[in-house]
Image (spheres, rainbow, N blue to C red):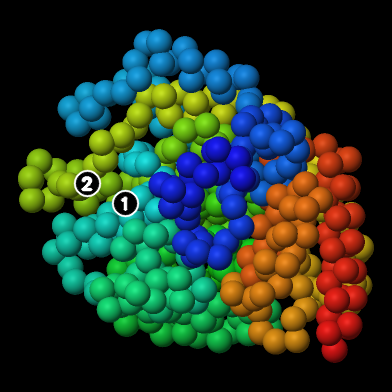
């Protein structure tokens, strides 16, 4: 055990893991390109973009230079009553790229807070108008973050069991499983027709933490059209899907009906600095466009619109709109070609691809679950071969940095097939 691991074990609490019984964390001393360099000289291929944020890979010099230059000028200022060029420039550049002609951008710190802001704005929209609409709709299996509002949107999730008694009620609409889309639409229409629904909050086309579940743009379009018809505020959580993950810059581009609010984070700075933004249509903004203090939006963070983060976000946008777009298409083509190698494997229940996302559901003989024991077996098997893949239960997925090479993608595909073969052999021997 190295000195760093010993010190870590004494004082540091890591996310999403029990305090006891876990393997020691791996000590990273450098990150460059698609690789994490460990103390012992190992190089781990980061196939999940370090929790989906490092869209341009690690150690990008263009992003580092943008950060350095901004740090020499202004590291941080209060954003209440003050402004600065990096924040204004980011809003001017990003808003026109979003579908629906959104007008305003509200800054926060991360994905959960960007959703929390969107949720609060959608609720206060109706309050400012003097109307009561007590219901909020979300899709079954939703995951929108770990703050209390975003936790509530997940319903009675096993993730948040300790907090269930403290969360507010949200109407959970059945997930639009293939072949059962009408059940989803019927339940959705019944709720929005009641006139009691204030907002519909959704992960467009892909439910990430639920297992990279990809669903039809046609059924989502029908839900959004119904929401628009009955004046329900539409809130798109594009924290994971934004900045090219689905093959378009934003997943909402696949639908004709645009959201009123879009929540963004993760890839916004290329993984260099924490930043969240919530982008709003004029419809929502109009409910706050007055000088009544009682109708102001009283929300803010100490690091709201941090100049360092905003500068890096602008630099990340430069890369995304240049090489990023070309690399996204190349990765999608590679994934599509690889699908046939997985879909006939006896250990694969289903395989799907959308843009740079490739996901496969491993056969367990029972219902898929985030808590499947297969997860730990596969995770360690991948890591032993110096590849970082973090299965969501029995769902293995790739969400690589856009700079990954075709050769590196091939290495990952081959490793997944090798581990599936080993797993199949182990299960047969146990049987």
**Tag 2 near tag 1, CB within 8 Å:** yes
236 sits to left or right of 194: right
Q: Position of residue 169 (x, y in %)?
A: 30, 77
- Residue highlighted by disc 1: 117
Q: CA distance from mark 2 to mark 1?
A: 8 Å
413 sits to left or right of 128: right
Q: Earlier in the sequence, mark 2 or mark 1?
A: 1
Q: Is residue 383 visible?
A: yes
**Residue at figure coordinates x 85%, y 89% from the top left:** 431
Q: Position of residue 289 (x, y in %)?
A: 19, 43
48 sits to left or right of 13: right
Task: Say which element carries label 1.
Answer: helix
Residue 88, compared with residue 187, is above or below; it is above
Residue 384 disc label: none
Q: Position of residue 113 (x, y in %)?
A: 36, 50
- Residue highlighted by disc 2: 299
């Amino acid at each position: 055990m190295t000195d760093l691991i010993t010190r870590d074990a004494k004082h540091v609490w890591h996310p999403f893991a029990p305090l006891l019984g876990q393997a020691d964390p791996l000590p990273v001393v450098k990150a460059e390109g698609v690789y994490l360099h460990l103390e012992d000289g190992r190089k781990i291929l980061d196939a999940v973009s370090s929790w989906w944020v490092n869209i341009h890979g690690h150690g990008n010099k263009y992003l580092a230079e943008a950060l350095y230059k901004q740090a020499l000028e202004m590291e941080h200022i209060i954003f209440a009553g003050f402004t600065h060029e990096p924040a204004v420039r980011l809003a001017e550049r990003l808003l026109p790229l979003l579908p629906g002609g959104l007008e305003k951008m509200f800054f926060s710190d991360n994905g959960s807070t960007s959703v929390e802001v969107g949720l609060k704005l959608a609720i206060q929209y109706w309050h400012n108008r003097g109307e009561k609409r007590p219901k909020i709709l979300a899709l079954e299996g939703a995951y929108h973050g770990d703050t209390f509002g975003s936790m509530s949107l997940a319903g009675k999730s096993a993730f948040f069991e300790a907090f269930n008694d403290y969360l507010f009620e949200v109407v959970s609409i059945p997930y639009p499983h293939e072949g059962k889309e009408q059940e989803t639409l019927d339940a959705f229409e019944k709720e929005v027709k009641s006139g009691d629904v204030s907002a519909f909050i959704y992960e467009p086309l892909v439910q990430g933490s639920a297992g990279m579940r990809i669903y039809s743009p046609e059924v989502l379009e029908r839900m959004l059209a119904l929401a628009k018809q009955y004046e329900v505020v539409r809130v798109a959580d594009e924290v994971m899907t934004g900045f090219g993950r689905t093959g378009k810059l934003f997943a909402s581009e696949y639908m004709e009906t645009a959201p009123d609010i879009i929540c963004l984070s993760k890839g916004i700075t290329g993984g260099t600095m924490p930043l969240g933004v919530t982008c709003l249509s004029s419809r929502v903004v109009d409910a706050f466009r007055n000088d009544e203090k009682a109708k102001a939006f009283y929300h803010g963070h100490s690091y709201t619109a941090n100049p360092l983060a905003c500068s890096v976000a602008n630099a990340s946008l430069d890369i995304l709109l240049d090489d990023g777009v070309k690399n996204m298409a190349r990765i999608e083509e590679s994934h599509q070609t690889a699908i046939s190698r997985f879909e006939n494997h006896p250990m694969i229940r289903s395989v799907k691809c959308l843009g740079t996302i490739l996901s496969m559901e491993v056969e367990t003989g029972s219902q898929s679950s985030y808590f499947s024991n297969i997860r730990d077996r596969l995770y360690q098997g991948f890591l032993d071969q110096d590849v970082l893949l973090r299965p969501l239960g029995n769902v293995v997925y790739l969400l690589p940095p856009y700079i990954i090479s075709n050769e590196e993608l091939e290495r990952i595909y081959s490793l997944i097939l090798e581990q599936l073969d080993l797993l199949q052999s182990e299960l047969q021997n146990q049987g």
